Image: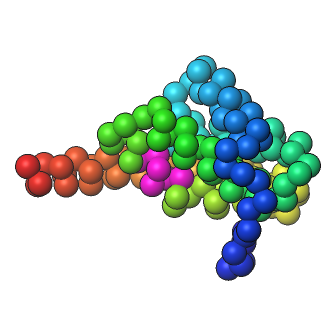
Amino acid sequence: MTDGKEIKLTFDPKSHSVDRLYESLYKLVQDKKLTTLTIVSIVTSLMQIVQNYDNITGPEKKLLVTHVLKRFVRDNMDGDEEVVLLNFIDLFLPSIIDTIKSVDNGKIKIKIKKFFKRFFRIVKNFSCIDKYVITRSIRTTK
């Protein structure tokens, strides 16, 4: 977490690190579709990759993962699918990354099956609710 402090980025959004991570994300997603249900495993893989980037700090790595995911969604998706994923990334991804990091560091001990069962239920509900709201708002604006 950032504890309300602004993080100054020392990496260029057009840098080699960003491009390498984007390429890694592209390879990961080729095997499975990027959705609110698959994003946790994809983010975990991206976190493992950026863990080896020595030239940026932990909070910057979190922003890098978020930046690359958003760029990927904007580049490869459109319509409701894009809106749902961008909202999900903005609302939940920072907390998801913090939680994964805390679990990895041993600060949080969870029973994996219970955690993911609850988490995926929440994600599935978010996806359905968001699609319902978007669909409803599109219908009412016509």
Q: Is residue 21 left or right of residue 32?
A: right
- Residue at 48% x, 35% y is 75
- Residue at 77% x, 41% y is 17
Indicate whether 64 appears above or below 44.
below
Figure colour scheme: rainbow
- Residue at 33% x, 42% y is 80
How many circles with numbers are drawn on the protein?
Answer: 0
Q: Is residue 7 left or right of residue 51?
A: left
- Residue 1 lies, in percent from the top left, at 72, 69
Nearest the eye: 68 or 98? 68
Residue lying furthest right in this view? Answer: 54
Quarter holding residue 16 = top right
- Residue 96 lies, in percent from the top left, at 65, 55
- Residue 64 lies, in percent from the top left, at 70, 51
Would residue 84 be visible to someone looking at this image? Answer: yes
Nearest the eye: 44 or 82? 82
Residue range in magenta is 84-89
Residue lying furthest bottom in this view? Answer: 4
- Residue at 47% x, 50% y is 86
Label the magenta part by its dominant secondary structure: helix
Would residue 117 be visible to someone looking at this image? Answer: no
- Residue 61 lies, in percent from the top left, at 77, 53
Residue lying furthest left in this view? Answer: 142
Residue 47 within the magenta-colored segment of the rendering: no
